[in-house]
């Protein structure tokens, strides 16, 4: 029982306490900072990542579908050239979460990301909700990026060799009709083979080892950044100011279709572009010095990509009319419009190689959430099994990869992307709230980084912006999120709550005594 210490909410049932009151109190048992630190010290996961590895993994996870795919879709269907404002608003919202993540990561150096942070601030029930939500975020995110990767894979062979792959085996067999809120079959499309295969390949790579995955991430990030910089420089000289008119197209009669509300809705969609830095906190236990290195990596990588995103959006909407950008590979569309074939090939290569790092980071994050939950007793023990040779949580990595590959093969990118964005916004909301709570419940805990401006200004403003962007999501996406959360609550009620190490301390104490 040495790994767990409890505050009052986890204390045994009192003589004058009713059964219902006791059960409700157990739902909000908080895991102590001491037990979290002991979990880090006794972890079997290999600690091999330095600050450079973390920065490259973070940039690799952030620069991906958001800028290679969704910026074009947001411009074409929601924001017009004002997608620059959408990306800035999404960046401001995400920056507050980045600061909050940095503070919590410097305090709680253990795998589990928002799940662990929430466990230490809001209690077990909320921690379960956010852990289950993060699972959706990373699995859906892996699938969404794989679909975008497939689009650039097709463009590469078309631009470089004139080979055009049939859509039957390179596109989703379903699309979502937002008007009728129903899925519809795509005639002649059966299975997205490239998207399926890339997820399977990267799952195998993750099973082989975290350090090997980090080296691969460093390589693909370098290629991706080179392609993006060449696009900004070469295509930037072809910007036509007329393409920026009207900067904010007039609303088309629905909330998300252009106008000011369309810019807000576009922010929700392109928020996907900033997702990735949070995955660093899921690999804290594999970092050599997480309390120092994680804040540096999170803030550093976030600052770099924010500047890149604004530049790309300006060039993208400046070289071609926004109405032409509703395509799985909008950067390639823009390059082809100005006749720079060589740049089109470079962009395709950068996207094909670069997007693999985003899939990699998402596939890396999900197993480590389940790993932390299983260590707390909320999921079956086999989930936390570590490979004896590779030092990775291989069982849940394989399961997650299988689910993500099937989703990538059958589901459209817009459905996957918006669902991931909304799920992440919920996680960011709880992280922002957690910073404020921990400033009061654990004021003396060591913090190598603090959110500037005190415990209220940035965290609570960030939480408010998270809720604002969630409110702009489609009703269908919110319904899917709540359906997933309902399934998770059933798992918690019928399994997790009965086996939780933290809230069932009496059983743990009895077991420890007998041993």
Image (tube, rainbow, N blue to C red):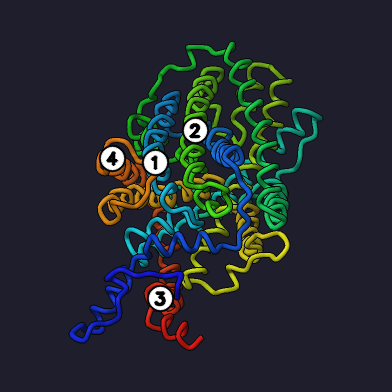
Q: Earlier in the sequence, mark 2 or mark 3?
A: 2
Query: From mark 4 to mark 2, how far is it between C-alphas?
Result: 22 Å
In this view of the protein, which residue sits in the foreground, 383 or 334? 383
Q: Nearer the viewer, mark 2 or mark 1?
A: 1
Q: Earlier in the sequence, mark 2 or mark 1?
A: 2
Q: Earlier in the sequence, mark 3 or mark 1?
A: 1
Residue assigned mark 1: 449
Instruction: Write the residue at 69% across / 21% down.
Output: 343
Looking at the rendered structure, the secondary structure element under dot 3 is: helix
Residue 88: image location, x then y, percent: 41, 29
29 vs 512, left or right, is: left
CB under 8 Å between discs 2 and 1: no
Q: Earlier in the sequence, mark 4 or mark 1?
A: 1
Query: From mark 3 to mark 1, how far is it between C-alphas?
Result: 34 Å
Instruction: Write the residue at 62% across / 50% down.
Output: 186
Query: In the rendered image of this protein, does residue 274 appear above or below residue 487?
Result: above
Instruction: Write the residue at 30% across / 68% down.
Output: 7
In this view of the protein, which residue sits in the foreground, 446 or 86? 446
Q: Is residue 190 visible?
A: no
Query: From mark 4 to mark 1, how far is it between C-alphas?
Result: 19 Å
Residue assigned mark 4: 461
Query: From mark 4 to mark 3, how far is it between C-alphas?
Result: 33 Å
Please rate how many residues cluster around mark 4, counting C-alpha atoms within 10 Å: few if below 14, some from 14 to 19, many from 20.
Answer: some
Residue assigned mark 3: 497
Residue 82: image location, x then y, percent: 41, 25
């Amino acid at each position: 029982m040495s790994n767990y210490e409890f505050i009052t909410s986890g204390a045994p049932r009192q003589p004058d306490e009713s059964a219902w009151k006791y059960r409700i109190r157990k739902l909000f048992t908080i895991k102590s900072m001491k037990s979290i630190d002991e979990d880090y010290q006794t972890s079997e996961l290999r600690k091999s990542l330095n600050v450079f590895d973390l920065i490259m993994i973070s940039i690799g996870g952030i620069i991906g579908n958001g800028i290679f795919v969704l910026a074009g879709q947001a411009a074409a269907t929601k924001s017009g050239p004002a997608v620059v404002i959408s990306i800035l608003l999404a960046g401001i919202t995400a920056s507050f979460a980045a600061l909050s993540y940095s503070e919590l990561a410097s305090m709680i150096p253990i795998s589990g990301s928002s799940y662990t942070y929430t466990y230490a601030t809001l209690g077990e029930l909320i921690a379960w909700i956010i852990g289950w939500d993060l699972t959706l975020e990373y699995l859906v995110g892996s699938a969404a990026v794989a679909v975008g990767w497939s689009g650039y894979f097709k463009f590469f062979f078309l631009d470089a060799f004139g080979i055009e792959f049939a859509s039957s085996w390179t596109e989703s067999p379903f699309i979502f009709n937002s008007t009728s809120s129903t899925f519809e079959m795509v005639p002649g499309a059966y299975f997205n083979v490239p998207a399926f295969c890339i997820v399977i390949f990267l799952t195998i790579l993750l099973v082989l080892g975290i350090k090997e995955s980090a080296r691969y991430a460093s390589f693909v990030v370098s290629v991706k950044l080179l392609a993006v910089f060449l696009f900004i420089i070469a295509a930037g000289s072809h910007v036509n100011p007329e393409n920026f008119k009207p900067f904010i197209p007039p609303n088309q009669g629905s909330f998300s279709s252009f106008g000011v509300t369309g810019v807000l809705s576009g922010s929700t969609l392109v928020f996907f572009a900033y997702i990735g830095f949070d995955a660093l906190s899921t690999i804290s236990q594999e970092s050599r010095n997480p309390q120092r290195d994680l804040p540096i990596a999170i803030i550093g990588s976030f600052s770099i990509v924010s500047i890149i995103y604004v530049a790309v959006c300006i060039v993208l909407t400046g070289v071609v009319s926004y109405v032409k950008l509703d395509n799985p590979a909008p950067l390639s569309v823009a390059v082809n419009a100005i006749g720079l074939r060589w740049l089109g090939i470079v962009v395709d290569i950068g996207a094909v190689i670069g997007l693999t790092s985003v899939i990699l980071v998402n596939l890396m994050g999900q197993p480590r959430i389940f790993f932390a939950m299983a260590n707390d007793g909320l999921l079956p023990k086999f989930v936390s099994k570590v490979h004896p040779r590779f030092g990775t949580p291989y069982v849940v990595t394989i399961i997650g990869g299988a689910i993500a590959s099937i989703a990538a093969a059958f589901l459209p990118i817009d459905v996957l992307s918006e669902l991931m964005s909304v799920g992440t916004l919920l996680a960011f909301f709880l992280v922002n709230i957690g910073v404020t709570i921990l400033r009061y419940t654990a004021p003396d805990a060591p913090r190598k980084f603090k959110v500037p401006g005190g415990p209220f200004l940035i965290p609570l403003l960030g939480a408010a912006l998270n809720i604002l962007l969630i409110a702009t999501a489609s009703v269908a996406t919110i319904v899917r999120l709540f359906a997933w959360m309902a399934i998770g609550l059933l798992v918690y009620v019928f399994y997790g709550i009965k086996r939780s190490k933290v809230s069932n301390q009496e059983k743990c104490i009895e077991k420890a005594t007998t041993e």
